[in-house]
Image (spheres, helix red, strand yellow):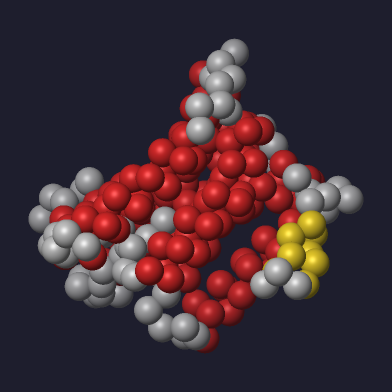
Amino acid sequence: MNIIRQPFRYQNNGAVYWLIGINVLIFMAMYFMGLRQLTYYLSMIPGLVMRGWVWTFVTYMFVHGGFSHILFNMFALFIFGTQVEQYMGSREFLLFYFVTGTLAGVFSFCVYYLTGSYAVILMGASGAIFAVELAYAVFYPDSIIYLWGILPLRAPIMVLGFTALELASSIFGLSRGVAHLTHLAGFGFAWLYFLIRMGINPWTRLRSR
């Protein structure tokens, strides 16, 4: 069997709740315990990565810039992540989460480096969460998501709509301060993960029904 596609033994250990807990603890340490310097130690800052701070390709996913930032990210991780973890199993889910999130950070670093944006501070779990949203749409293509709690959308439509919105925002410079390319990278690396690791063509699943 191809080692790349070697499956893990299925277990569901609630990894999503551990991820949420770590994010919340770091947020509380930063904003309620006066440890704001964690922003610089954990966020991905291209200038510091060039000095060897490569761990921030992973740790940037656990830092958030404000209450609304962490609230929406953790809410999305809870809603979509628990279902994806249930389908994939905890080990596969964690591998998926960290591979897509880390590669989204590496991709963002390359873009910032090539454009001379060495002082940008990249933080937040959004890259990995956008990957999780794609996984949710692939596994549950008939699921209905109520956007803003009102507008019903099938999961694939939501994912493709978010992708188009992120692409437009990146091209036209909308919503400054939001790492749209990191979000798109999360989608892109999730797509590749499905093709390479799981042997699944996401497009076939998204348009099958």
> Is 116 in front, or is 77?
77
| 5 w.r.t. 29: above or below | above
Residue, far right: 209
Q: Residue at x 56, y 21 (%)?
A: 11
Residue 59 visible somewhere in the drawing = yes
| 193 w.r.t. 177: above or below | above
Query: At which x and y percent is residue 115?
Result: 30, 74
Total residue callouts: 0
Residue 98 visible somewhere in the drawing = no
Q: Residue at x 56, y 26 (%)?
A: 12
Query: At which x and y percent is residue 155?
Result: 74, 57
Position of 103 with respect to 129 (left or right) is left
Residue, far top: 1
Q: Quadrant of the N terminus?
A: top right
> Is 202 in front, or is 95?
95
Position of 16 with respect to 113 (left or right) is right
Residue, far front: 32
| 142 w.r.t. 197: above or below | below
| 126 w.r.t. 13: above or below | below
> Is 40 in front, or is 163?
40
Q: Residue at x 79, y 57 (%)?
A: 144
Query: At which x and y percent is residue 197?
Result: 57, 32
Q: Residue at x 71, y 69 (%)?
A: 149
Query: At which x and y percent is residue 162?
Result: 63, 68
